[in-house]
Amino acid sequence: MKQHSGNQYNRRDFLRMGTAGYLGTTLAATSLTGNASVANNSGTMIGFHAPPMAVVRIGFVGVGGMGSAHVKNLLNIEGVEIRAVCDLKEERIARIQDWVTKAGGKKPEAYSRGETDFKRMCEREDLDLVYTATPWQWHVPICLAAMNAGKHAVTEVPAAVTLDECWLLVDTAEKTRRHCVMMENCCYDRPEMMCLNMVKKGLLGEILHA
């Protein structure tokens, strides 16, 4: 694993206490719902809130079964606009375009020129957030492309599959001042945090499977 500055080692110590993930998710949700706007000059994303948005303009990548379900939910949320859809299969994009227009929205633009066409979508100036529900190996590349293009990034689980990938997401979020959120509602509930704490204290011995 690559070496980090002392500031980042301190941050890792904080993460080990099991609260930073919860704080990051809470702060991200707060910022996108417009409840606060607080700048942070510490270099980390802890305590950072993006400016509130009356409308969140979304580009969606991966609209298979799970992605389509998320789009359905988004269409029921006031203040959300699906501006662009990216998928390898044009028929999936057409289905989402039909849903959006039937819900009263403008037909989202299609992106289907191969596996990396999400990069072209991320460069759009009319997007605030890029949402991915693709196969796992694409979560990190899409989130990185979104943040580097000035968009917030949200992803289906898992956000990453290695520690290096996790730190790459953290480093990029800090550099770009854009949120990167894993869209999972049970990572930081009390039972999960309790189990994590028990593992860290060595109460369960060596974990072989979970």
Image: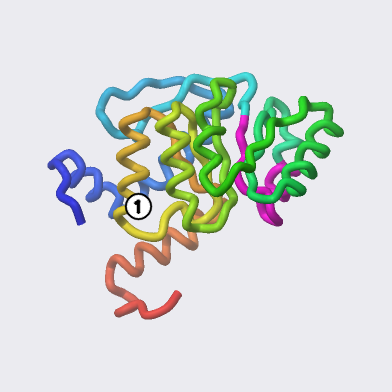
Residue located 49% across and 62% down the image: 191
Q: Quadrant of the C terminus?
A: bottom left
Queried whether the magenta region covers residue 192, the answer comes back as: no
Residue depicted at 32% across the width and 33% down the height: 174
Asked whether, in this view, residue 131 is left or right of residue 205, the answer is right
Where is residue 107 drawn, in percent x and y? 77, 29
| Circle 1 SS class | helix
Mark 1 crowd level (few <14, some 14–19, many ≥20, 10 Å Cα) = some
As for residue 69 lying within the magenta part, the answer is yes
Vertical order, 37 against 210 (above or below): above
User: In the image, what residue occupies the spot 53% across and 33% down?
Assistant: 120
Residue pointed to by mark 1 = 165
Find residue 103 and report its image quarter: top right
Give the residue at the far right of this rendering.
Answer: 102
The spot of residue 102 in percent (x, y) is 86, 33
The region drawn magenta spans 58-73
**Where the N terminus falls, by quadrant?**
bottom left
Q: Quadrant of residue 47?
A: top left
Number of marks in picture: 1
- Residue 6's image quarter? top left
The location of residue 146, given as percent across then percent down, is 47, 35
The colour scheme used to paint the residues is rainbow
Measured as percent of width and height from the top left, residue 139 is found at: 48, 50
- The residue closer to the viewer here, 129 or 7, is 129
The residue at the point 44 percent across, 29 percent down is 149
Residue placed most toward the observer, 155 or 206: 155
Q: What amino acid type should be assigned to the residue bearing mark 1?
A: Glu
Seen in the picture, residue 162 relative to 42 is either above or below; the reply is below
Query: In the rendered view, would you say 163 is above or below 11?
Result: below
